[in-house]
């Protein structure tokens, strides 16, 4: 129920019915008996329908979102408190992008930059990077660190055409109300041959297919509005004139204590056993890839590529 969700206003909110954002079809079928989760019968895109309007969704991404007691329903336990693990995760992703970069010192934009931890990691890697986020709290934290960041939606920033070598969408495309429009805007502001890097939960992954309605990814209704598979996301990228050049599962560094907290939702015995390890190795982090988050890297097609 809406009133039981953390980080969400308790005022009455109207729900909007929407067509498929990819193909425009209005006919859907239910998914795994999860309330308001549907799948387009034409293209297979999974999304929340009906859903709250953007003005009702945006307030959930302020300070409480980054200090959340129940992150399985959205948000983070302590985003800045986990900064060392988040920095290592981003450093690993930046290193993986290095062979694909179109410039030695890429000019980059991080959409959904949160408190600027990726901006820090990219700056350390030699990138010329800035960020944008709808959360005034998050952007204020990034600016306090000396990072370049602004508050607002990407569409309202009015960046010139062909501005960036790289645009990143780390765990953000699933949150937006119109992902196809965001991808089109990313394509517009990328230079020809520029890269768009996306990470998002993979609704077509083996864990999602096995756990179905119990998959952790489906517990974030109204925080996550879209649930992509590699196929559905690749189709949306292709429609936006972006060619996928890399597709893989991706994980993150996470402390044993965080793993235990999440594991309790699946097996208390497993959490207890892992807890004994945590007591022997406090503050230890591991790189965990459960294969249910994907990272797609797409390149903006040049006029010659489009002609083919």
Image (cartoon, rainbow, N blue to C red):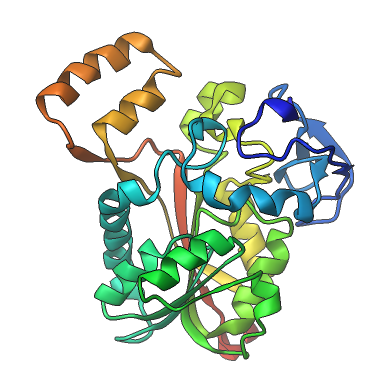
**Is residue 262 shown to the viewer in this render?**
yes
Q: Is residue 17 above or below residue 274?
A: below
**Is residue 241 shown to the viewer in this render?**
no
Where residue 96 sits, quadrant-wise, is bottom left
Where residue 3 sits, quadrant-wise, is top right
Where residue 16 sits, quadrant-wise, is top right
Image quadrant holding the C terminus, namely bottom right
Q: Is residue 235 above or below residue 216?
A: below
In percent of width and height, residue 189 lies at 59, 83
Q: Residue at x 44, y 79 (%)?
A: 148
Image quadrant holding the N terminus, namely top right
Residue found farthest to the top: 269
The one of 15 and 165 positioned closer to us in this rendering: 15
Q: Residue at x 45, y 78 (%)?
A: 130
In percent of width and height, residue 115 lies at 44, 61
The one of 63 and 169 positioned closer to us in this rendering: 63
Residue 282 shown left or right of residue 152 in the figure: left
Q: Residue at x 31, y 17 (%)?
A: 271
- The number of numbered badges drawn on the structure is 0
In percent of width and height, residue 85 lies at 27, 49
Residue 13 shown left or right of residue 242 in the figure: right
Q: Is residue 175 above or below residue 285?
A: below
Residue 52 shown left or right of residue 102 in the figure: right
The one of 212 and 81 positioned closer to us in this rendering: 81
The one of 192 and 106 positioned closer to us in this rendering: 106
Q: Residue at x 38, y 49 (%)?
A: 250
In percent of width and height, residue 222 lies at 69, 41
């Amino acid at each position: 129920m809406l009133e039981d969700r953390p980080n969400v206003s308790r005022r009455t909110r109207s729900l909007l019915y929407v067509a498929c954002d990819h193909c425009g079809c209005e006919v859907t079928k239910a998914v795994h008996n999860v309330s308001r989760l549907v799948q387009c019968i034409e293209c297979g895109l999974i999304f929340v329908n009906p859903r709250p309007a953007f003005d009702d969704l945006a307030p959930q991404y302020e300070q409480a979102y980054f200090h959340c007691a129940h992150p399985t329903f959205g948000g983070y336990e302590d985003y800045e408190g986990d900064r060392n693990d988040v920095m290592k995760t981003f450093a690993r992703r930046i290193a993986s992008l290095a062979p694909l970069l179109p410039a030695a010192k890429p000019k980059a934009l991080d959409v959904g930059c949160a408190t600027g931890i990726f901006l820090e990691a990219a700056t350390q890697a030699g990138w010329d990077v800035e960020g944008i986020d709808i959360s005034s709290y998050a952007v204020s934290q990034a600016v306090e660190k000396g990072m370049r960041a602004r508050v607002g939606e990407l569409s309202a920033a009015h960046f010139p055409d062909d501005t960036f070598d790289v645009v990143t969408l780390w765990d953000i495309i699933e949150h937006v109300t119109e992902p196809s429009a965001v991808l089109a805007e990313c394509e517009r502001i990328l230079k020809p041959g520029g890269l768009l890097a996306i990470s998002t939960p993979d609704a077509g992954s083996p864990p999602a297919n096995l756990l179905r309605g119990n998959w952790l990814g489906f517990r974030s209704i109204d925080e996550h509005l879209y649930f992509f598979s590699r196929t559905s996301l690749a189709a949306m990228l292709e429609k936006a004139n972006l060619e996928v050049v890399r597709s893989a599962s991706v994980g993150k560094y996470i402390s044993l204590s965080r793993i235990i907290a999440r594991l309790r939702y699946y097996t208390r015995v497993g959490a207890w056993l892992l807890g004994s390890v945590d007591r022997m190795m406090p503050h230890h982090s591991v790189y965990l890839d459960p294969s249910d988050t994907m990272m797609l890297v797409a390149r903006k097609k040049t006029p010659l590529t489009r002609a083919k």
